Amino acid sequence: MDVFGLVGNPVGHSLSPPMHEAAYDELDLEARYVTFEPEPDAIADAIDGAAALGVTGLNVTIPFKQDVLDCVEADELASRIGAVNTIDFTGERVTGHNTDAVGALRALRDHDVTIEGARAVVVGAGGAGRAIAFGLADAGASVAIANRTASKAHDLAAEVPDATGHDLAEETLAELLSEADVLVNATSVGMDDDETPVPAETLHGDLAVLDAVYSPLETRLLRDAADAGATTVDGAWMLLYQGVEAFELWTGRDAPVDAMNQALRSRL
């Protein structure tokens, strides 16, 4: 039996176990997905222990996405992003990957959003923002990164190909979004309150708007975007597809996307 899992602290809130277990059931795989919650200073021992126990693959969440870089051989994308969210133990070496970037891209493409040649605005320069900005740029989009602390946006833009950094002033967003094709909220704004990082009047019907927040599914940003006639993509799609990408990396099989999506959304 293959053992997969999630390592983080805390992990009790995670929706990954039911999503992955649904995939195993759908494909009749002898596998289980479990959670591990090591102490913050014990992640290296946890990864070594997982390898010794024959764990096949691990997802990684807060606060360990950066720490595990020292424990694995990270691929080129994860190294550039500076974070690992998926570990594969099946090869000769323990490898680290970042499926958040691909998760965002697959979520957009699933909604018929063209990325190559698009003008994208990413709000937020934290972990999710880094992954999404690199993913969009690698897929052929030009990327404007807007962040509350503008210096962080400028620093990230210096690393991402064909990217620029900006502040979050309303006039800045209005100018950026007037010609944008894609908007991604990569902050937590809207998760705990009915707020939005982007004024409604800056949105328009030619935008595709992805909100990485998945609880609630319908954030104020997405409501405002729908009212403006924009294409809306809720955060559960990104969560789904980062899991799909990890499943396919570990197993070499096409993921049962519908079964995983149903299991995920039934718990939201």
Image (spheres, helix red, strand yellow):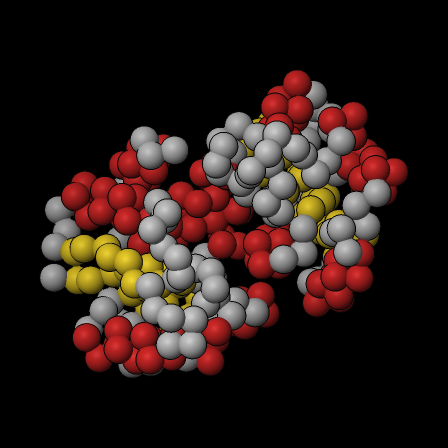
Q: Is residue 37 left or right of 167 when viewed as pictured?
A: left
| Residue 147 position in % (x across, y down) | 74, 51
Which residue is drawn at the image coordinates 32% and 75% (left, top)? Answer: 46
Q: Nearer the viewer, residue 3 or 220?
A: 220
The residue located at (24%, 57%) in the rendering is 34
| Position above or below: 165 against 261 | below
Q: State the residue in front, 190 or 212.
A: 190
Kindly tell me whether residue 23 is visible in this rendering. Answer: no
Quadrant of the image containing the N terminus: bottom left
List x then y, in percent, for residue 83: 52, 67
Determine whether, in the image, residue 255 is placed left or right of residue 234: left
Return the x and y of residue 106 as percentages of the image width and height.
48, 44
Q: Could one spot residue 209 in this view of the protein?
A: yes
**Numbered disc total:** 0
Q: At x 45% / y 38%, what residue is drawn? A: 236
Compare residues 58 and 105 and report the one nearer the observer.
58
**Which quadrant does the C terminus fall into?**
top left
Q: Position of residue 244 (x, y in %)?
A: 36, 49
